[in-house]
Image (cartoon, rainbow, N blue to C red):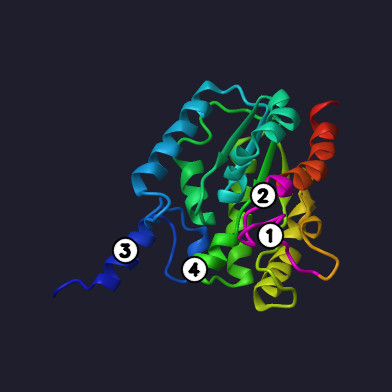
């Protein structure tokens, strides 16, 4: 009898310990979607660069995430002033979903690293690219946190709520962010996890997002990164300057 593609998928998931009923957000996979602004080869090259940092094992502070985390590179003076003194490493790669970050953690992003603090912001691309529900996105964030706790056993986790996106308030997108963050917040019940929702600093009084803060209503501008750093730096100072 000819084996169907669905049966092959079922067998593949079973081998990796997952079933078709598990949300995609928790199933570690490398990047498979190519974007105009990032080829697959570029994604693998960025991951290879991170592996080199992990193998060196010198970072006290580690950032994990997607393009919003990677985007600290667009505000180099802020990064240099606020985080570089802590021997910080940035493992953000644009376009990543929770499942892509899980794969990176399973394939070299841990290695010899023994950071004191790991900053995590992930999940918005599960909405944008997979139209994932709040609960499925939360499951992916939870899996990333669990993997970070395991891979970096001496680290405190500074876990972010997903940032708001889209210009207007009171949209389905904003509601999904709030619903997901309400679930993510519970992960701080673990004594090694501190949860912070800094999303409000990017909003105007009427709840809108301005272009001066997020030019595309998703990624912070340099001004946006300054606002984020103003919130984050005291948290990290309290953990790293004991």
Residue found farthest to the front: 212
Which residue in the protein does label 3 denote? Answer: 11
Q: Quadrant of the C terminus?
A: top right
Would you call the spot at circle 1 few (<14 residues within 10 Å), some (14-19), or many (20 or more)? some
Q: Secondary structure at mark 3?
A: helix
The mark closer to the camera, 3 or 4, is: 4
Residue positioned 19% across, 71% down in the render: 3
- Label 3 Cα crowd, 10 Å radius (few <14 / some 14-19 / many 20+): some
Q: Which mark is residue 130?
A: 4
Label 2 vs label 4: CA separation? 25 Å
Q: CA distance from mark 4 to mark 1?
A: 26 Å
Decide: marks 3, 4 in contact (CB < 8 A)?
Answer: no
Q: Give me the C-alpha separation between circle 1 and circle 3.
A: 47 Å
The first of marks 2 and 3 along the sequence is 3
Q: Which mark is in front, 2 or 4?
A: 2
- In percent of width and height, residue 232 lies at 79, 42
Q: Earlier in the sequence, mark 3 or mark 4?
A: 3
Which of the image's four quarters has the N terminus? bottom left
- Nearer to the camera, 55 or 49: 49
Residue positioned 54% across, 66% down in the render: 128
Residue 221 disc label: 2
Q: Quick one: label 2, few (<14), some, or many (20+) residues within 10 Å?
A: many
**Dot 1 corresponds to which residue?**
211
Check disc 4: other Cα within 10 Å, few if <14, some if 14-19, many if 20+: few
State the extent of the magenta-drawn residues as a range. 207-224
- Residue 167: x %, y % from top left: 68, 69
Front residue of 188 and 238? 238
């Amino acid at each position: 009898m000819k084996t169907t593609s669905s049966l092959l998928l079922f067998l593949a998931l079973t081998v990796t310990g997952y079933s078709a009923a598990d949300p995609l957000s928790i199933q570690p996979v490398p990047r498979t979607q190519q974007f105009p602004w990032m080829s697959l080869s570029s994604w693998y090259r960025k991951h290879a660069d991170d592996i080199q940092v992990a193998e060196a094992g010198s970072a006290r502070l580690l950032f994990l995430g997607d393009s919003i985390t990677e985007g600290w590179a667009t505000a180099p003076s802020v990064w240099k002033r606020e985080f570089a003194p802590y021997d910080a490493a940035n493992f953000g790669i644009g376009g990543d979903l929770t499942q892509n970050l899980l794969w990176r953690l399973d394939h070299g992003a841990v290695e010899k690293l023994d950071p004191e603090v790991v900053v995590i912001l992930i999940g918005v691309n599960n909405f944008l690219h997979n139209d994932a529900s709040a609960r499925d996105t939360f499951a992916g964030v939870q899996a990333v946190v669990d993997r970070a706790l395991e891979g970096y056993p001496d680290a405190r986790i500074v876990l972010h709520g997903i940032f708001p996106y889209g210009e207007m308030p009171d949209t389905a997108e904003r509601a999904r962010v709030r619903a997901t963050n309400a679930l993510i917040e519970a992960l701080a019940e673990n004594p090694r996890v501190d949860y912070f929702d800094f999303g409000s600093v990017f909003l105007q009084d009427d709840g809108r997002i301005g272009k001066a803060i997020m030019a595309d209503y998703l990624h912070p501008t340099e001004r946006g990164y300054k606002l984020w750093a103003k919130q984050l730096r005291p948290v990290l100072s309290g953990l790293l300057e004991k």
